[in-house]
Image (tube, grey):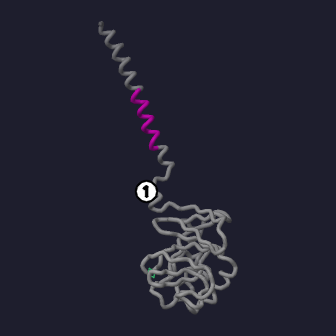
Amino acid sequence: MSADGVNKERRRFLLATTSAVGAVGVGLAAVPFISTWLPSAKAKAVGAPVEVNVGKLDFGQILKVQWRGQTIGILRRDERMIEDLPSLDDRLRDPNSAESIQPGYAVNEARASNAQFLVVNMHCTHLGCVPQLIPQVGAQPFDDDWKGGFYCPCHKSKFDMAGRVYNGVPAPTNLTVPPYSFLDDQTVLIGVNPEGAA
Ligand code: FES
């Protein structure tokens, strides 16, 4: 084969190789680009916001979701449950939520931006058990004058329907309220404050 023939063969080989590498390069470049659009399981675990539809929740019902490894409850309250809250203040350790953890928009009697929905971290502020919701009013084995609320069977802590802790129980503070916002009437976003709020 002449020198010219060798050069032509070599050019063909190089062109074919370059095209193949180029194709692989595009393929590899495309994968990370697409994956940046998908939140990874790790990102979800470290605290991506969680969107929850509360449209089907009845009064007195609670919906539980996981956010940042914690159980978050969304409780729908009726008028009676909301109106009963002030009557309990004398029996509570921190009725005004002065020493408890919640966003500014939850520092009120209902501990909520919308009194109908309590969004609350369900872990007891004593040692972290998840209390039971007992919304019924009436005598209970642990309280003769129960107005509805949360009862932690681990060491008998009690919280009202706003997650406010009773006097004389081991839990030191009210249940914590996480950041949240309403995207519309039926959709709550856990983990994000409303725009302009803190
Ligand atoms: S963990 Fe709830 S009372 Fe101890």
Q: Is residue 10 visible?
A: yes
Which of the 4 image quadrants contains residue 162?
A: bottom right
Q: Residue at x 55, y 66 (%)?
A: 190
Magenta stretch: residue 62 in it? no
Query: In the visual, does 28 lie left or right of 59?
Result: left
Q: Quick one: 190 or 18, which is closer to the camera?
A: 190
Query: In the visual, does 45 lie left or right of 195?
Result: left
In the displayed orientation, state which residue is furthest to the top.
2
In the displayed orientation, state which residue is furthest to the right.
79
Q: Which residues are magenta?
A: 20-32
27 versus 72 height, above or below: above
Q: Residue at x 68, y 77 (%)?
A: 78
Give the amino acid at mark 1.
Lys
Q: Is mark 1 within 8 Å of ligand 1?
A: no
Which of the 4 image quadrants contains residue 28?
A: top left
Magenta stretch: residue 28 in it? yes
Q: Tell me the quadrant of the picture where the C terminus can be found.
A: bottom right
Q: Quick one: 20 or 125, which is closer to the camera?
A: 125
151 versus 167 height, above or below: above
Q: Is residue 113 visible?
A: no
Q: Secondary structure at mark 1?
A: helix
Q: Which residue is mark 1?
A: 42
Where residue 40 appears, as percent x and y from the top left, is 46, 53
Q: Residues within 10 Å of mark 1 (few under 14, many from 20)?
A: few
Q: Residue at x 66, y 65 (%)?
A: 56
Predominant secondary structure in magenta?
helix
